[in-house]
Image (tube, helix red, strand yellow):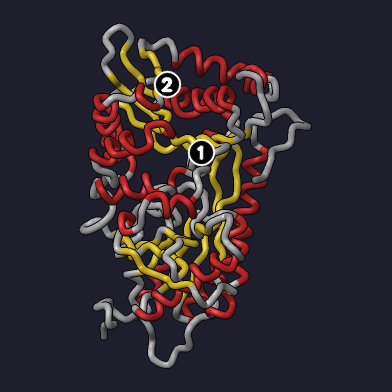
Amino acid sequence: MTTADGLPSTRQAGCEPAPRPTPADADVPGSVSVTVLPGIDAVPAADWDACAGFDNPFVGHAFLAALETSGSVGPGSGWRPRHLLIKERDGRPLAVAPLYLKSHSYGEYVFDWSWANAYENAGGRYYPKLQAAVPFTPVTGPRLLARPDADAPDGLRRALLAAMISLAERADLSGVHVTFPTRAEADLGEDLGFLRRQGQQYHWENPGYRDFQDFLDTLTSRKRKTIRKERDRANSQGVTLRLLTGAEIESRHWDAFYEFYLCTADRKWGQPYLTRSFFHHLGERLADRVLLVMGEQTGGRRPVCGALNLIGGDTLFGRTWGALDDFRFLHFEACYYRAMDFAIARGLRWVEAGAQGEHKIQRGYLPQVTHSLHWIADPGFRAAVARFLEQERAMVGAEMAALTAFGPYRKGDPPVCR
C-alpha cells in the first residue's frame, strides 16, 4: 500500500496513532498557513534568516543553500528537502524549519540503526522518515525557527511540530525526528508528546580568559605540562599553521581542504557526504563565518592539513579535520588549542569539538548534554523506544558524571553545564 504521495505505508492495521499536538495546542492565529518547500531557494534568504537569526550559521539560508546547490543534499543523497514555512496571509514569514525526507540514517549522528532493524524485523517499514536537522552537522542549535518579533513564538514552534506530524501521518511515515535542538525546544517537544533522547558531546568553556596561560592555570600541574609538551611538539614538525577567515581563504585552500576531507572520510566512515563544490559555495556565501586552520609545509607552502570551524554568536563550532600525512599532536593543536586561542581572542564563550573522542577531556573539553526528539507513529514501537530511552538516559548520565570527574581541572573549578 502507498500513500497519495507515492510513499510506502508504515502503519500496522488496527493501531491507534501516537500522541500528537493538535492545531489548538499550537495557539497560533487562524490566519496563518503552512507551506512545504521543495528546496531552500523556494523562500528568499532574507525571509528565512529573519526567522533563523544569525547566532548559529548552520540554520542560516546560506549554509543550507550551499548543501543543496552543491548536490550534497537533494536527489540521490537520501536527503530530500521538505522545509516548512509558516506565513501570514499577506505573505509575511513567521517561522521556518529545516526538514528532510530521509531514506536512510546516514549523516545524522543520533544513531537509530537498531531502531530501524528492530522495526523492520517486526514487519514494519522504518524508511522513509522525516528529519528536522542540519545535514551532516551534529551541532546543537535551533530547529524550530520563529521570528523573535512575532506574536506567540512558542505557539509557532508548536505549530511547526504539529505540521511535521501531520505531514508524516498523511504520508504514512514511521516517524518524525528532530536532532540536536536546543534544550528549550526539547522541553517543548517533550511537552507535546515527543520522546526525548539525550546524548553527549565535548565542549570547552571560556569564562573570560585573557590568554591561553589563563586556561592552563586552571589545570593540575601534570596536565599543564602535558599540554605544553604537545603544543611544542606539534609546532616543531616543519608545518606552519595559519588561521584564515573571510577573504584570506582562497579557492586553492578549499581545493586542498577537500582533499583533506576525503582522507578523513576514507579513514573514518568510508563515504564522503560533502562535494567539492560545497566547500567553494561555503567560501562564497559564508567566508566571514569560517575559520580555516590551514597547515602548510614550512618554506614550501604545500598544504598538508586543515581544520574547518564556523563562527557563531558566542561559539566556535569545530567541524572536521583532515591531513595528507601523519603528524604527531598536530590534530590536537589545529583542532583544539588553536580553536581555544581564537575563542579567547574573539571573546567567544564556547568551543564545540563534537561527539566521540574521550581524549578531548584531558584537553579541557568536558561532556555536555545534547538532545533529540522522536515522534513514533506505531504505538507498540513507540512504547519499546520509550523503554530503551529511559534506560539509555540513565547510562548517559552516569557516563557523563564519570568522565567529568576524570577531567584535567583543579579541584574547586567546577565545569559549567549549558
Query: What residue is shown at x 59% (from left), y 74% (from top)?
Result: 27
**Label drawn at residue 312:** 1
Query: What residue is shown at x 56% (from left), y 26% (from top)?
Result: 346
Quarter holding the C terminus is top right
Q: Which residue is mark 2?
A: 243
Measured as percent of width and height from the top left, residue 397 is found at 64, 53
| Amino acid marked by disc 2 | Leu
- Taking the image as drawn, is residue 166 in sight? yes
> Tag 1's secondary structure?
loop
The alpha-carbon separation of the residues under discs 2 and 1 comes to 16 Å
In the visual, does 180 lie left or right of 134?
A: right
Q: Residue furthest bottom?
A: 14
Q: Which numbered disc, 2 or 1, marks the residue closer to the eye?
A: 1
| Amino acid marked by disc 1 | Gly
> Tag 2's secondary structure?
strand
Quarter holding the N terminus is bottom left
Query: What residue is shown at x 56% (from left), y 15% (from top)?
Result: 228
Q: Residue furthest front?
A: 90
Q: Residue furthest left?
A: 76
Measured as percent of width and height from the top left, residue 34 is found at 42, 71
Measured as percent of width and height from the top left, residue 216 is found at 65, 21
Query: What residue is shown at x 40% (from left), y 72% (from top)?
Result: 118
In which quadrant of the rendered view does residue 280 lie? top left
The crowding category of the residue bearing disc 2, from other C-alpha atoms within 10 Å (few below 14, some 14 to 19, many at least 20), is some
In the visual, does 94 lie left or right of 45?
A: right
In which quadrant of the rendered view does residue 163 lie? bottom left
Label whose residue precedes the other's in the sequence (2 or 1): 2
Measured as percent of width and height from the top left, residue 157 is found at 54, 65
